[in-house]
Image (cartoon, rainbow, N blue to C red):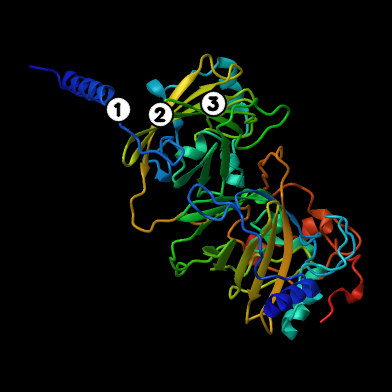
Amino acid sequence: MKRTWLILAFAAVTGFAQSSAYVPPRTSDGLPDLEGIWQPRAGGAAYSILPHPGGFFLGAESKEGVVEGGALPYQPWAAAQVKELTQHMEFDPTGHCHYEGVPHAMYFSFQIVETPKYTAILHENMHAWRIVYMDGSPHPKDYSAWMGDSRGRWEGNTLVVDVANNNDKSVFDMAGHFHSDALHVVERFIPVDRDTIRYEATLDDPKVFTRPWKMGFNLKRAPKDYLFLESGCFEDERDQQHLVNGLATLPKDHYKQ
Amino acid sequence: MIHYRTLTAAFWLTSFIASAQAPYAAPRTRDGKPDLQGIWETRNAAAFDVAEIAEGHEIPYLPEALEKEQKGNRVDPMAHCAMPGVPRANYLPFPLQIIQRPGLVIILYEYLHNQRLISTTPREHLDGIDLWMGDSVAHWEGDTLVVDVADLGDKTWLDSARHTHSDALHVVERYTRTGLDTIRYEATLEDPKTYSKPWKIALTLHRNTQPGFELREQECTEGDDGRAIQPQYRPAPKGDPLEFIRTYPSKSEVSK
């Protein structure tokens, strides 16, 4: 009991929870039913994962951001590089129609499909998809990808996805937050109620950060009439001039260390 | 002496009758539908010339459509990393994976991470929208999955041999399990602005039976290989926002 209260208190203070008392229904295969289309409440994380004012692109202002503690533990060289990248939004790979990578892809609507062997995550944005093998198989060797390689398991009712084999080109947002190919992400999809999943990710990248860090936000079930549509993107869309210095409006102390 | 061709015809006729007499009983999914799931691939050269798998190896172009095609864009949209469209996606030399859930068939294509979410609940096609991969609505006819594809627009090609279509293209696909490791795929293409009559293509989707085979990422963007987007610390352009476009480093510069 004491422990539960401690966890609840921790969750209340940080907004981060590792488990939930809610028991979701089962699929026909007997798996916790997290299937459906989910819409993140990520507060403009695609714009910046840190607290930020409203912006030209995604509009939403966020006083909290999605990163636990509101700051990223960059190594000094990496902090300098982020400041530089902020002024070079044109190098944002998503502006060139590349995959977002994980967790960047999770700031947009996606659909979960469950089978005993694998869980499929279909991302609406960039028509990306992931097949998360649930059979205990290891990450492949000598493989590097924009979306990395996802292997999953069930911990009670929580879907845990381990993402490795990330390349060093995908980024966390449009604000220049980046990682290396050493990035390792552990995602947790914690069912909170029928229409809510808590999404939490622990991110570790010893080449860029001084310690692992966490991000989290809620996912809400999409309305029944939500139509999952094709999101095509390829270069030569002739709007890149809008990207140049697009973040120049951010306050100078935006990146607190 | 029996002509070789007659023998061949007799052989095909016999095998046709045999297959007609004993259709393959496809395994079922949990909700009782024929199980099409797995990783499949084609073994033909239709990606280069769709006529190879067309009935009679001919595409019934209207003369004016043929003329338009000769004058049209000579660069394959896929060279610009555009999505391939339907049916082209199905015979690209990359595997695809079919996933089934109640009321839903999903086709994931390895190439350019294309995905089709196909509802088996009948509905009208979307109005006033063009999609690279079209709008797919499916139903089951016996053991055959029939997928009706519209809203394909006029930007995609059918192969790299510049066989094109208009925005009136309407494709009806039929997927039938014919064996443990085979799916018969047929598609009828109807486009009254381009073809004088509907025409058919057919191919076999073969299961990839390599142990542990999984789909991998096949990304494509223009100026590809990702080098063009590596940060190059050049001073940010001042004043003229278009200067960036004009001074963007060429691929050869970036790779140095």
Residue B59 appears in the picture as rendered? no
Q: Chain under label 1?
A: B
Of the numbered discs in the image, which one, if any, rests on residue A199?
none
Q: Earlier in the sequence, mark 1 or mark 2?
A: 1
Residue type beneath disc 3:
Val
Q: Chain under label 3?
A: B
Residue type beneath disc 2:
Asp
Q: Chain under label 2?
A: B
Image vertical order of residue A138 relative to residue B5, above or below:
below
Q: Nearer the viewer, residue A253 or A107?
A: A107
Label 3 vs label 1: CA separation?
A: 25 Å
Asked where in the image residue B22 lies, by quadrant, the reply is top left
Residue A73 position within the rendered picture, expressed as x and y whole percent measured from the top left: 74, 81
Q: Are marks 3 and 2 in contact (CB under 8 Å)?
A: no
Q: Which residue is mark 1?
A: B23
Q: Nearer the viewer, mark 3 or mark 2?
A: 2
Q: Which residue is mark 2?
A: B143
Of the numbered discs in the image, which one, if any, rests on residue B171?
3
Q: Residue at x 77, y 76 (%)?
A: A9
